[in-house]
Amino acid sequence: MRLALISDLHANAAALSTLIDVLDSADRVVCLGDVVGYYCQVNETIDLLRQYDPICILGNHDYFLLHGCRDDASDSVRFGVEFAQRLITSQHRAWLSSLPHVWGGEIDRRSCLFFHGSPWQPIDHYLYADSPLLSDLDLFEQDLLAFGQTHRPMIRLEKRPALINPGSVGQSRNSQSYGKACAVILDTETMVAQSIMREYDMQSVVEQALEHGAGEWVRKFLPEERTDSLSITAKG
């Protein structure tokens, strides 16, 4: 079975649209959270995603939309969430409300656990490649653990459980995939994974956000600013 793994779409339908052929080629689509936030193509992104009847879990921005931002939320987080709260349709809000924080089950006889941040704190944790918590995932008995949140791709297939973070569709934050829509296709029979990165018109997405009142923070992730030594430490 071909499993398409995506995460952190962040209301960026322009980015998601570049992956349509990837999603079409998959037998099952898994979205690892943060459908909304940052950008302004809220309903367009959810419309496109829901066409694939995905397994989808709740991300922190999705949670904030439903329950409100924390007091210490950054301007960028608050903008995307509050914009989505005003614009999202009642049907899409109800769909987000139905999403689990963690999904566990079997896909093609492979036991899987999907979460956004970590299995212990799916909304708040960040499992970067150097996170000390990453080694604790070795204690899990599933064949595959997949997660998002960091906006940085990570694939570990050499031991069980396999670990996959497909990176971000809507706002990638590492130098190799900066300004690109990211996804992973996993062959569940062979457990071979293919990382996919697609260029898209990020400038138009940013300009749209600025037109709707986003601050200059939105320019931080423009492809024109990419350098080989790029380091982005933003969270959310």
Image (cartoon, grey):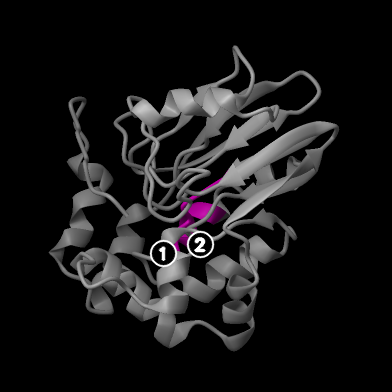
Q: Is residue 135 left or right of residue 19?
A: left
Rounded to the nearest angstrom, the CA distance separating label 1 from label 2 is 8 Å
Residue at numbered disc 1: 61
Q: Position of residue 107 (x, y in %)?
A: 80, 39
Taking the spot 85% from the left edge, 34% from the top edge, the residue there is 108
Check residue 9 for magenta coloring: yes
Amino acid type shown at disc 1: His
Q: Residues within 10 Å of mark 2 (few under 14, many from 20)?
A: many
Give, as a single range, the part of the protein colored magenta.
Answer: 6-16
Residue occupying the far top of the picture: 158
Kindly indicate whether the residue at mark 2 contacts the one at mark 1 (C-beta within 8 angstroms). Answer: yes
* Residue 20 makes an appearance in the image: no
Lower position in the chain sequence, tag 1 or tag 2: 2
Q: Quadrant location of residue 85?
A: bottom left
Element type where label 2 sits in the image:
loop
Taking the spot 71% from the left edge, 56% from the top edge, the residue there is 54
